[in-house]
Amino acid sequence: MINYKELAQKYSTPLYVYDFDYMSAQYEKLKEAFRARKSIMAFAVKSNSNLSVVKHFADLGSGADCVSIGEVRRAFLAGIPKYKIIFSGVGKSDDELREAIEKDILYINLESYAELERVEAIAKELNIAARISVRVNPNIDPKTHPYISTGLHGNKFGVDINTAKRMYIKAKNSENLDPIGIHFHIGSQLTELDPIVEASEIVADLVRSLQTLEIEIKFFDIGGGLGITYNDEVTIEPYEYAQAILSTLTALDITVICEPGRFLTANAGYFITKVLYEKENNEKRFVIVDGAMNDLLRPSLYDAYHKISVVDKESSDVTKADIVGPVCESGDFFAKDYLLPKMEHNDLLVVESAGAYGFTMASNYNTRGRSAEVALVGGEDRLIRRRESFEDLIANELDLMEK
Ligand SMILES: *Cc1c(COP(=O)(O)O)cnc(C)c1O
């Protein structure tokens, strides 16, 4: 049991707490599921990019899936070996591409023909053959929230099969490109296996047809997206996930790469926030807390559901309330019509499943410093990011009134 009260007293609120042992257990479960093949688990750094978290996964043997050169630098700092680092994303700048090529990471995941040409030109300047993969958009509906669906032609991600083929042929004939991987990622918070298997079949077929062109793909990157339980979702079992993917790869000698984010970190995280006030506007009940959308954006951005629990309080006499923050936006809420007992000043609420896309999406809106982050390792708590001060917030601003 996590002692939220003690943590809140020690580190103040709002506060992010991550159970590192839970992250390890999730990592091992997924890695184990793919044991029948050579595999790399490449942690999706964007889900939780605190250096201590990335280092924790590095220590477990994980690779890293990065979507900016900043994340690539984090992966290096955390000690992830370069041959397990992947760089994805639809809009990489020349500087980012150059640095990734120079750093000699496993491969750059290309998301357009134009990007292939940029990488070729930069690799030529550097007199290098850049290792690449192509992100294929298999045009599959992942049956998840539209904002986190990525594998339909209407989404900005990846390229269609024919463009992918052209890209591989171009890469094969270039001295400065080395096509070694293929990638797809159809969306996040996936709870149905069928769309994943369908996508995997389409991409595996492409690998086979590339073989006939003497293009040998060594890495089959299935992306991330494995769903978790926020409320009562029935999720995909890692073993079944792995078996289903592997069944599409018969007769292919290929290493599987998986890019889990949320699956590893979401349910390891708790966001502790303190009640400031209760109020009622014409029958409508609001519980106002010290955390806000700038700390945890998912409810505002995706209308996402998070379980919220009350610390040390009998929850018998409950009524519906909106749980809202101090930020000046109507969209600043953690839950609507949530059943809560009468709350007092300084009571604590815990927003669960907050370990993924929580702190990493935080901002300084309303000149609010970002929360502290604490790791729980074997029952011990350790500060892994200090709370931002006002001085931190203004540090980069130039004083126009000075001269
Ligand atoms: C976001 C993302 C992931 C991780 O998604 P999760 O839902 O957190 O598992 C993996 N790969 C790519 C390319 C992504 O964009």
Image (cartoon, rainbow, N blue to C red):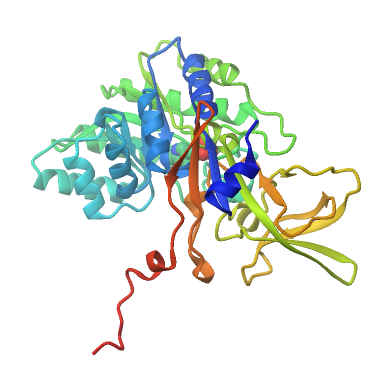
Residue 188: x and y, percent?
56, 40
In this picture, is 265 found above or below 200?
A: below
Q: What quarter of the picture does the C terminus occupy?
A: bottom left
Q: Is residue 3 visible?
A: yes
**Between 344 and 283, which is closer to the camera in this rendering?**
344
195 with respect to 163 (left or right):
right
Residue 322: x and y, percent?
77, 59
What residue is shown at x 64% (from left), y 67% (from top)? Answer: 326
In this picture, is 148 found above or below 207?
A: below
In this picture, is 283 found above or below 40?
A: below
Residue 281: x and y, percent?
84, 71
What residue is shown at x 36% (from left), y 19% (from top)? Answer: 255
Tell me which corner region of the image, top left, top right, bottom left or bottom right, holds residue 239: top right
What residue is shown at x 65% (from left), y 39% (from top)? Answer: 143
Residue 309: x and y, percent?
73, 43
**Between 371 and 28, which is closer to the camera in this rendering?**
371
**Between 80 and 102, which is closer to the camera in this rendering?**
80
- Give the tally of numbered discs: 0
**Between 167 and 80, which is closer to the camera in this rendering?**
80
Q: Is residue 137 visible?
A: no
Tell me which corner region of the image, top left, top right, bottom left or bottom right, holds residue 207: top left
What residue is shown at x 46% (from left), y 29% (from top)? Answer: 222
Q: What quarter of the picture does the N terminus occupy?
A: top right
55 with respect to 266 (left or right):
left
